[in-house]
């Protein structure tokens, strides 16, 4: 949190004196990171239902009151931890065509999903089913991340004359991560070059282009 600045005031008997700003104690960013790392570790170990603010406080060394000052509830804490973990950004569309940009994007997305711990993903999915607040927070993050992935390459493709369906962004967000998760988690296979080309050429391009 930023510093708190008191508003200047001048009463009828103050002679117009302006009080100096009152600055709060700087936020301890190292403590923030300890809290978020502890949250992710416990979420993977015990699941969302069993995760508690007290356990996070014990693991991180932070006071429980400190955690509650920063995060209004468990859902907000978990969402912040997920955002802290997901710091990588999609690649800029650098290829000369939509296919090339999608190959780069899907390669990046496959790497991001492969690096996630399966236990963490399972805990998040289970928590979203049982806690409407967590589901709301996670969908907010997902919508933001989906927009970050698709806005630039799709806008570029349209500028270059591609005829895309109006639902192109939504279709990419629905299909690409699901196919990659199936490949990694269900099939137990890597997102190698042949698979990425198959996903782009046989699934995504036919879906995204208008007919």
Image (cartoon, grey):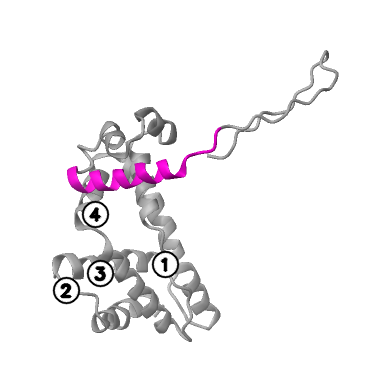
Q: Which mark is residue 189?
A: 2
Identify the residue under disc 3: 180
Magenta range is 25-46
- Residue 191's place in the image compared with 48, above or below, is below
Q: List x then y, in percent, for residue 146.
A: 41, 62
Element type at mark 3:
helix
Residue 134 rendering spot, x and y as whole percentages: 32, 42
Closer to the chain start, of discs 1 and 2, is 1
Disc 3, disc 1: CB below 8 Å?
no
Q: Residue at x 32, y 64 (%)?
A: 174
Total marks placed: 4
Dot 1: element: helix
The residue located at (32%, 66%) in the rendering is 112
**Neighbour tally class for label 1: few under 14, some 14-19, many 20 plus, Cα within 10 Å:** some
Q: CA distance from mark 1 to mark 2?
A: 26 Å
* Mark 3–mark 4 distance (CA, rounded to whole Å): 14 Å
Cα separation, mark 2 vs mark 3, equals 10 Å
Q: Earlier in the sequence, mark 4 or mark 1?
A: 4
Q: Which residue is nearer to you in this view: 63 or 130?
A: 63
Q: Which residue is mark 1?
A: 169
Q: Which mark is in front, 2 or 3?
A: 2
């Amino acid at each position: 949190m930023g510093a708190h600045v008191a508003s200047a005031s001048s009463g009828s008997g103050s002679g117009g004196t302006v009080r100096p700003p009152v600055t709060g104690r700087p936020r301890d960013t190292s403590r923030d990171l300890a809290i978020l790392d502890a949250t992710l570790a416990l979420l993977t170990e015990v699941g969302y239902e069993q995760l508690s603010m007290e356990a996070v406080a014990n693991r991180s060394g932070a006071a429980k009151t400190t955690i509650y000052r920063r995060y209004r509830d468990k859902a907000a804490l978990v969402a912040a931890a997920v955002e802290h973990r997901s710091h990588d950004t999609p690649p800029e569309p650098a290829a000369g065509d939509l296919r090339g940009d999608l190959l780069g994007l899907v390669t990046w997305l496959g790497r991001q999903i492969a690096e996630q711990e399966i236990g963490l993903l399972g805990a998040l999915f289970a928590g979203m089913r049982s806690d409407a607040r967590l589901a709301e927070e996670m969908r907010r993050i997902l919508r933001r991340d989906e927009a970050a992935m698709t806005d630039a390459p799709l806008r570029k493709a349209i500028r270059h004359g591609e005829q895309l369906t109006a639902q192109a962004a939504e279709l990419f967000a629905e299909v690409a991560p699901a196919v990659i998760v199936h490949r990694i988690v269900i099939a137990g296979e890597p997102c190698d070059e042949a698979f990425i080309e198959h996903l782009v050429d046989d699934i995504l391009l036919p879906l995204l282009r208008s007919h």
